[in-house]
Amino acid sequence: MKKGVYLLTSLLIVGSLLLSACSDQKEAAPSSTNTTQTEQGSKDQPTATPAASPAGESGLSAPYDAADMSKLPAVAKQRTDTIIVGLTDPSGAFTPYFIQSGYDANVNSLLFSSLVTVDEKGLPIPDMAEKWDVSDDQLTYTYHLRKDLKFSDGSPMTADDVAFTWTLLFDKSYDGDSMIPTLPVKGGQAYKEGKAQSIEGIKVIDPLTVSVTLEKPNATALVMLGDKVLSKAYYGKDYKFGQLEYIKKLHSNPVGNGPYKLEKFIPGQEVRFVANENYFKGKPKTEHFIYKTSEGDTWQYLETGEVDYASFSATTENIDKLKSLGFVNIIPYTPSTYGYLQVNLEHEALKDKKVRQALAYGLDRQSIYVDANQGAGAVANIPSSPISWAYTEDGINPYKFDTEKAKQLLDEAGWKEGAGGIREKDGKQLVIHYLGSKSKQTDIFIAVAKENFQAMGVKFEPEVFADFNSLVSKVEGGDYDLVSFSTPMLTDPSDGLVQFVDGEIKGYDNPKVKELYDKGLATSDIEERKKVYKEIFQLLNDELPIIFTSYKKTVYGYNGRIENLAVSPFVGLANSLPDWSLKPAQ
Amino acid sequence: MSAYLTKRISYMLIILLAASLLIFSLYALTPGDYISNNIKLSPERKAELREIYGFNKPLMERYGIWMKNAFHGDFGYSLAQQKPVLTLFNEYIWNSFLLASVSTFLTWLIAVIIGVVSAYKQYSWFDTLVMVLIFAAMSLPSFFIGLFLIKVIAVDLKWLPPGGMLTTGSNATGWAYVKEVIRHMTLPVVVMTLLGVGSLTRYFRSNLIDVIKQDYIRTARAKGLKESKVLFRHALRNALLPAITLVGFELPALFGGSLIIEKIFNWPGIGQLYMQSFGLRDYPLLMGFTMLIAILTVIGTLISDVLYHIADPRVRLH
Amino acid sequence: MSLNSTPLPGTIGSKITGPKSSSLFGQSMRRLLKNKLAISGLVVVIIMFLACFVGPFFSPYTDNKINMAMMNKAPSLKHWLGTDAMGRDVLTRVLQAGRISLTVGLASMVLSVFIGALLGAIAGYYRGIVDQVIMRIADLLLTIPGLPLLFIFGALLSDWKIPTEYRMYIVMFMLGFVNWPGLARMVRGQMLSLREREFMQAAVVLGLRDRRKLFNHLLPNIVPLLIVIATLNIGGSILSESVLSFFGLGVMPPTPTWGNMIDAANNLIDFQEHPWLWIPPGFSIFATVIAINIFGDGLRDVLDPKQKR
């Protein structure tokens, strides 16, 4: 009996290590990391299972106001000039364009304002640029800055800063995930390759006017280029082409132009902000704002008043519980994303449109995504979020769950029932190899799909991967038939279509889609674009190069004392935050 | 002894070298990298970034670069946190150490006390009750115990905070700061102690039962010594002696952080950081941390072997 | 431990006078049967096995059909332990889960104890170069991080197209292979100490062969230790299955195990609102752990050569 404990503790440690891995990864399911600007304090709760009543309609369609503010915990009552929101692990890299995760983006959106922002429909509205012009050929964008813009250190912000920011992103050593370097800015490529001293297409016209010229029209350029602006004096002091290392040293001391300034960053615990007196719309109403690092289940923090704001999956049970707390206001919210099953188009059986359609009919998406989630989801049929201005159901086939229809399509495609009830064609069985990453949603999917596929006469072979990253590696290897994914946040309707034209979906090459995609970007006229997107949606809805699955539904619960709170699906809290104020506690 | 130590230390270095290669290869083989995680990027941009980060270089070349830097005291730069790995360790490890050291101390203290009592009163109701509780704690995953305490103590009774290390927004300093930290660490320490105390108690109990049956205890009793004296002077000392060899093995655990507990209680520790970085495949940080733990493990093994000799001189060092 | 520890006359005597081990075994069994507590533990374990392997045949819900209209219902006459998030009967699932959890828990425990004990015993007995090699390999293995290893296993097994239902057993085997150092160190330490005792010196004087010394004299002395460790680990082993499932290395959903049933309730809402989701599997593990440990304690008492007869 000597070293007994060692083994035991070591086993316990390993066990616990792994278990924690579980709980941790549960949230790291698709679409979680590096999605920009979703202001979800804690991201979606791990899709809480439960349901007291048979699931059906979503529990909340309109904002709900706190019913009993007297239940507010004392901790939250005592705060007079501070608002606290939960946020999963911000990293400390607070320089825009160099951030490493969506959480850093949240921090960023308080520290920096954009030239152009978007309204709740995703349409551009002025922010630091008071107006802009687009040339008739749709190639040149001219931004007119507001007067008297200042950085948080008091220095003035001019068109030079804007030009510097854009130029920096075309540096060959730029390693961030901004999409700006992918825009066809005139001379951008030459600069990147070191053949030019500056970018030909970027012109500073006067201190308040800057313009940029593209080689090819792109309707997303206005908002994309109209992003955050770095101070040339601060971030450009040591800039030499091809060397961006120096910027890392500036990450922890941002100089911004947003509503708040960074007060203190306590790694793993808090990011504290203080109102920026130089903010161009005036100093925000609440002096202090804190992002509290909190991961996973945030119920306990909301319930005890440690945070003022948290996001939850819109399950009936979560909503009921939020209502019962008494002191929270609730707003329903649909993230601007869509979920889908990527189909391996390089596999013989799945090249056939009829087979793909059969799968869409034969899969009970209503049960998987809506009922099992107690209404915290909706069935998707096109590559666009329902909140987008381009969304339409006109001429869209809803692929309502219909096993008979699915069977009929499979018969037509030549897959006839063979031994053991599994369909065969040319002596080969119809087998669907499905990949998912470990999450509650995947478990639900596999359980239901197994029954559905069996009914259709398709052999279903599910495989689960420990996390999103290992799932992606497997998919890159090409050994799969179906895999569950969700898009990152989509601002422009074209964002949801990129994957059909940039080669991301291997084996899909439809010139018609490419043509329409370009057509959609060639004009800034919304009505014109709507028509084009409708056509694309109808086309993709029929062809199903991927099988559309679901939209998520979430709710935000927040302390009833906070006034003027609004959440935009595209920019999160950032737009309304400067106006937030705390009502006196009762 | 010193010859033994020299030999062991040289072995240790060889093992660490082998371990570094092994660990490096393991992480290199792990599916996914920091880039594949970002679903926003187009395939071309991904390739470009892999070029910038040097992910596409051959394995041995990357290992060589890593080792060379490590010998110069540079353990790399975290991709996700955008800070030098060592800075991050310094920011997070001490928080983990605080939790681990306090709970380890309590675990040992409680395990000794309960172990002695239940061994002495073997098969009594106390012994049985302790056993049932220990097994109950072992049958539930630790997140459950954590959730339970948060629910009851923090949310319902509001006696202690539900998580974190400081009250959000607090500017406390000095004594107030210490008090705040103590309040926040109570629940996680309780859970960690509960989880660890079980097997250790069983260990002490069965050790002591062994010792009590030995002839010299019989002799001591026969001499007419008082029971308490027999128990504490003779039995306990001999039962505890072998346990000190375990101390060495606690070394990596003290600095390694507790993954679940830190997560459940939102404790800003290294375990949580490691898990997060793993999800993101932030290899520089993962490598650095794993090497650190490897070094501590090897040192811990050495300490424990030496202590083993001290505790039981019959065991020859060689 | 004392210098004059009992030189086990009984054991050595029986060995010298010839193959009377069956009677020793019989003797132990008789004493075991007299230990009511230990036997009751064994009975509980047997009942658990029976219930899990036979029980589900009497359930009307064995097909595990999904029924969204019945999700998360509290226990009732129709569903004695309620239903889960997909409307499946919890009782049936707990019993079905037991089949896998019990098998896997016991198998992985036996495997890791076997490998660890064997290597530890060899290292401790032969010492010298053998010991150095084994223990340094152990040191090396202790430095390997578990997490990437599991991810790699997951990817490899997937690439090799091993059917998902067999993966768990392969991984259990691999883990047993990687996890031996802790136990091996412990057994080795015990061996180092034991071989210096008088009874071993006696064995050396008698000129016994290595194998005989190792298997007849040293191993019986560490059996009690092994039993305690093995039985203490059973709970961890059962739970570790859910960890493997988590990495895509265990059973595939919708097949239930106790571990993944508890895991499914890993949030405050389920914890609070649906206790029937986690109490049944939690209690099952608890009952198994405690029953096996009680039995293990009894077995230990009987097999420990140091215990008084």
Image: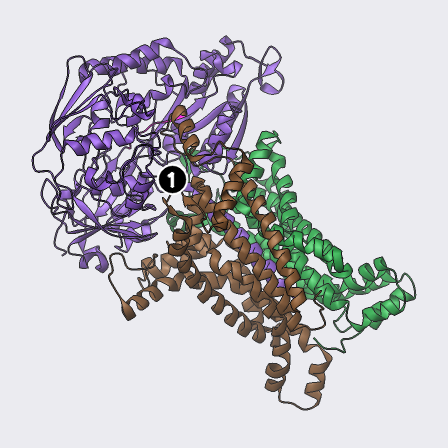
Chain colours: A purple, B brown, C green
The image quadrant of residue B261 is: bottom left
The residue labelled by disc 1 is A47
Task: Please say if A517 is above or below B131.
Answer: above
- From where the camera sits, is residue C248 visible? no
Chain under numbered label 1? A
User: What residue sits 68% from the left and 49% below the top?
Assistant: C111
- Residue B312 image offset from top left, x and y in percent: 68, 72
Q: Which of the two residues, B202 or C28, is positioned nearer the viewer here? A: B202
- Residue C39 image offset from top left, x and y in percent: 69, 61
- From where the camera sits, is residue C225 visible? yes
Q: Which residues are magenta?
A: A335-340
Magenta run includes residue B7: no
The image quadrant of residue B23 is: top right
Q: Which of the two residues, A369 or A567, is positioned nearer the viewer here? A: A567
For residue A333, side relative to residue B150 (left or right) = left
User: What residue sits 17% from the left and 41% below the top?
Assistant: A258
Quarter of the image for the N terminus of chain A: give it: bottom right
